Amino acid sequence: MQNKYMTFPRYLEAPIRADLAGKMVLLAGPRQVGKTTLARRLLDEESVGAYFNWDNRLDRKEIRAARWPGGRALVVLDELHKWRSWKGWLKGEFDAHRERLRFLVTGSARMDTYRRGGDSLQGRYHHYRLHPLSVAELRSEGVADLPIPGGEIQVPLQGDAAVVQSMMAFSGFPEPFLAQSARTWRRWQKDRLDRFFREDVRDLESVRDLSSMQLLADMLPERVGSPLSLNALREDLEVSHRAVTHWVDILERLYHIFRLRPFVSKRAQGLRLMPKAYLWDSSLVSDAGPRFENLVALHLLKLCHLLEDREGIRAELSYLRDRTGREVDFLVSIDREPWFAVEARVSGVRIDPSLLYYRERLQIPYSYQVVLEGERDFVEEGVRCLPAARFLAALC
């Protein structure tokens, strides 16, 4: 599995390569998801290029002095968003050298939110979000076709349940997934979390009580799949509501968590406004049910982000819930119109009544119940129940 993966490109390499011909590219994503590896692969294809990392003292000097290669070249700037004045400076460099230099800027934070001074880069860049490995990316060796927005998901006849189980155990982050070793996964996870708080949070945010924020991060895996009550977290941590809100925002900006909000529609009144939080590293979730739900959420979010980043299509991932407790795990919508709903189950083939209710109420074109442990594929009252290995392989 490891050698096979190393021979094919990540799913964003081709669109990034094409976009660099006319604009700079900002590539964001969680720590150790493969941004630097992708950037170096693109550099290897160039006759002239340079890589600079803001975390490196010598590279910082080169960046500030704007010592670029001669001739036409690709310049990769890693973690540049940690520099307070990076956007205004980058705008100037791009405008001055756009005829010969192409800039690829990577970072482990939502760079579109860090507008710390300087002019906006609006109109000068394309923004991509790199995700962990997915079932479809591994199956297609990095060139999976996107599902047609608004159309039925074209599920392959065969799936690889072993890949799904490996992602359940080790996540889709390249290093632990490819190693297939519990020992490697434990050491990788510990190092990643230590560096996340010691470097990313420290360099980008003002946090007075870092230990309490780490306690918050430790508590979130237990709340995956449930509405996230900031008030309950505040009481457990014995801190202010403002502090908890600030910390959760930071964890989202730095790609530790992502939040899904309920879909709001006139056709389904009474939806609760409380979001649910999921982790970019699904292997941090201990219970099998929430961990599987988190894994499915990551695959669906990857689809939405790719539709938005590459195709410019407004795709959104949300969930369904009302005051009576009827809930469906996920709804993917295009331009605020429902496309398909997904209920994630570890086992069992009985169609969830809430899925049937919302399918009719919201007139959802396609509905799927995705099962981790099971091989049956059938349709009941317009809802398709099928194995997770096949459904996830049909995404991207």
Image (cartoon, rainbow, N blue to C red):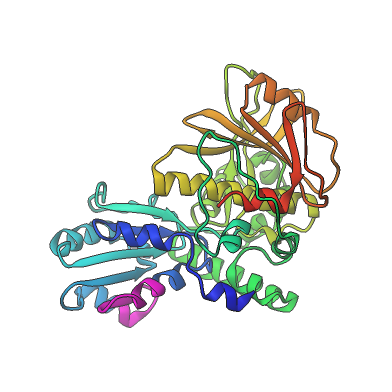
Residue 209 percent coordinates (x, y): 57, 59
Residue 275 percent coordinates (x, y): 62, 38
Q: Work out whether 245 lies above or below 367.
A: below
Residue 240 percent coordinates (x, y): 60, 45
- Left or right placement of residue 107 versus residue 285 in this view: left
Q: Work out whether 125 lies above or below 36.
A: above
- Left or right placement of residue 193 versus residue 72 in this view: right
Magenta run includes residue 20: no
Q: Work out whether 224 lies above or below 159.
A: above
Magenta run includes residue 51: yes
Q: In percent of the image, x 50 and y 68: which residue is there?
A: 34
Residue 31 in view here = yes
Residue 378 percent coordinates (x, y): 78, 38
Residue 237 in view here = no
- Left or right placement of residue 6 versus residue 281 in this view: left
- Tell me the quarter of the picture where residue 153 sits: top right
Give the camera-side residue of 149 and 228. 149
Give the camera-side residue of 194 and 232. 194
Tag count: 0
Q: Which residues are magenta?
A: 40-59
- Left or right placement of residue 377 versus residue 114 in this view: right
- Tell me the quarter of the picture where residue 135 sits: bottom right
Give the camera-side residue of 311 and 54. 311
* Extreme residue in the front direction: 157
- Which image quadrant: the N terminus? bottom right
